[in-house]
Amino acid sequence: GQQLNQSPQSMFIQEGEDVSMNCTSSSIFNTWLWYKQDPGEGPVLLIALYKAGELTSNGRLTAQFGITRKDSFLNISASIPSDVGIYFCAGPQGAQKLVFGQGTRLTINP
Amino acid sequence: ETGVTQTPRHLVMGMTNKKSLKCEQHLGHNAMYWYKQSAKKPLELMFVYNFKEQTENNSVPSRFSPECPNSSHLFLHLHTLQPEDSALYLCASSQGIRLGAFFGQGTRLTVV
């Protein structure tokens, strides 16, 4: 099946810094989804992307659908403590399934 | 009440116990899912239900038994589990997978 590889696996940054992470696949996706999971909670959908090259923002978060359709990027500007968590990319596999990356764990030093 | 609600939030059970996890969605979605999240592993899809019919069983052991009585409720019945089954079990619902799946808060299961 399709696999999604996220990079980096973990990040340790200072509050106020910008963050960049990416997700790659060996096969083409027609949708990219980005989720955030807080400790002890379920993942929450942040951004959905549907078109190659699309750039979509949600507050300080911006995600892009790569033009090759095999990758996607998530940027967080001016990080704050509540940005801490695990960020997952996901894409549809067939008509009913989502496949997830292994996640990028973000830690912020005050 | 809105969204996807899972109960209980935490569960400790012995290997000979029988327990059930419950999920309820108030979003009017047609599809419901069970996922397993273990430490340092990607989210693993277990089961998919579409309009109450099971459409996917991702090679899940028979000690996990799902039940979907209607489009709003999903159960996961557990019996004779193993310690390696300890994980966060997440329920989700969707109205079209390209729109994304919406997750509950999960049940943290510990098998002792």
Image (cartoon, helix red, strand yellow):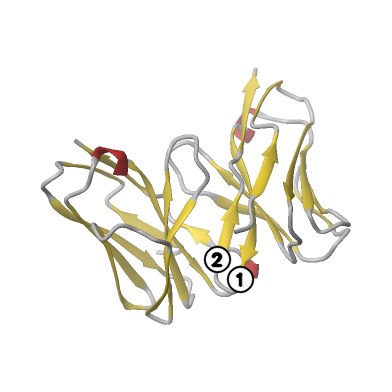
As shown in the figure, which amino acid type bears the numbered disc 1? Answer: Gly
For the residues labelled 2 and 1, the Cα–Cα distance comes to 6 Å
Find the residue positioned furthest to the left. B16
Residues at circles 2 and 1 in contact by the CB criterion of under 8 Å: yes
In the image, B58 versus B36, the foreground residue is B58
x 79%, y 55%: residue: A70
In the image, A70 versus B100, the foreground residue is A70
- Residue that carries the numbered disc 2 in the rendered image: A97
x 77%, y 66%: residue: A50
Q: Is residue A101 left or right of residue B29?
A: right
In which quadrant of the rendered image does the C terminus of chain B lie? Answer: top left
**Rendering coords of residue A49 (x, y %):** 75, 61
Say what secondary structure mark 1 lies in. loop
In the image, A39 versus A81, the foreground residue is A39
**Rendering coords of residue B102 (x, y %):** 52, 61
**Rendering coords of residue A3 (x, y %):** 63, 51
- Residue that carries the numbered disc 1 in the rendered image: A94
Quadrant of residue A69 within the rendered picture: bottom right
As shown in the figure, which amino acid type bears the numbered disc 2? Answer: Lys
